[in-house]
Image: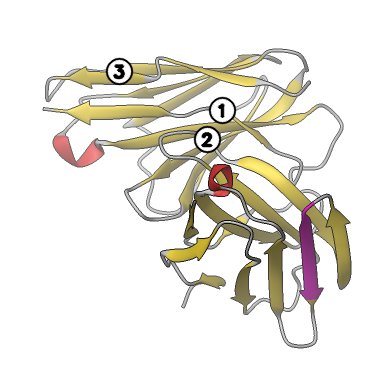
């Protein structure tokens, strides 16, 4: 069993809709959680970085972490075609730990 | 800031040859760099962690004699795929952590697509 599980999609939404992405994890020692965006044939780009439980908002992006249920989410409001990409969640136990990535969810925002 | 480059962006080589991929942190010093590989529609798999001036730490199942890593300076790490075979064809991505920052602050390069014929 992978430590971080993520539905690979694809997830197709119309422009302007809210994109809802999530991951589950099994290692209760994870404390740092990240969301990366990866365009085709490019390296991942860090979108959101969260420590422990709670919400974090940055523009159109909101990240949520629920450690009690081992569930992490990313919401993208007012989605744009340029948001079409693969979104990867990642987690680690501490500042110096290895990142454990989910499989990535492909998102397609249609005009 | 925090830009990481990779060279080449893509390479095609014949089976049995060696290929070197460079990873550079352009505007910061990186004590630690990481090498990942990614197969189509799959996630990033960590291959090795490289620390400047010391030997790389390889993940279980990664052949260190096949994937040679050198981290000669605080801004450059190289991955050499020796005696490449078609099964080594993949997308190789490096990342770097700024000096004195945690490993979870990783900035990724654009990746190198390797195709072995």
Residue positioned 63% across, 70% down in the render: A20
Badge 3: how crowded within 10 Å, few (<14), some, or many (20+)? some
Q: CA distance from mark 2 to mark 3?
A: 20 Å
Residue A95 percent location from the top left of the image? 81, 50
Residue density around tag 2, few if under 14, some if 14–19, many if 20 or more, within 10 Å: many
Residue at disc 2, secondary structure: loop
Q: Is residue A27 left or right of residue B18?
A: right
Q: Can you give x and y, in whole percent of width and height, for residue B73 in the image?
A: 66, 12
Out of B99 and A106, give the one closest to the viewer: A106
The residue that disc 3 covers is B19
The answer for how far apart the CA atoms under marks 1 and 3 are is 18 Å
Q: Nearer the viewer, residue B94 or A65?
A: A65
* Residue B47 position in % (x across, y down): 47, 43
Q: Which residue is mark 1?
A: B109
Q: Which segment is the magenta one?
A: A60-65
Give the chain letter at badge 1.
B
Q: Residue at coordinates 53% horizontally, 43% vertically from top-left?
A: A38
**Residue A83, can we see it?**
yes
The residue that disc 2 covers is A43
Front of the two marks 2 and 3? 2
């Amino acid at each position: 069993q992978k430590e971080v599980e993520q539905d690979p999609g694809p997830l197709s939404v119309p422009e302007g809709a809210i994109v809802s992405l999530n991951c589950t994890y099994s290692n209760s020692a994870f404390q740092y959680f990240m969301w990366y965006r990866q365009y085709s044939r490019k390296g991942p780009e860090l979108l959101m970085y969260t420590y422990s439980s709670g919400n974090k908002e940055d523009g159109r992006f909101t990240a949520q972490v629920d450690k009690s249920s081992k569930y992490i989410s990313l919401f993208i409001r007012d989605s744009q075609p340029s948001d079409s990409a693969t979104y990867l969640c990642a987690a680690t136990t501490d500042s110096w730990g290895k990142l454990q990535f989910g499989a990535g969810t492909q998102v397609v925002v249609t005009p | 800031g925090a830009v990481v480059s990779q060279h080449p962006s893509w390479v095609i080589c014949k089976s049995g040859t060696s290929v070197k991929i460079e990873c550079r942190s352009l505007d910061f010093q990186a004590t630690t760099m990481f090498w990942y590989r990614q197969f189509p529609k799959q996630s990033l798999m960590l291959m090795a962690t490289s620390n400047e001036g010391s030997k790389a730490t390889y993940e279980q199942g990664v052949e260190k004699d096949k994937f040679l890593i050198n981290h000669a300076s605080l801004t450059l790490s190289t991955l050499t795929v020796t005696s490449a075979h078609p099964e080594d064809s993949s997308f190789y991505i490096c990342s770097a952590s700024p000096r004195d920052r945690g490993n979870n602050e990783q900035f990724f390069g654009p990746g190198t697509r390797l195709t072995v014929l």
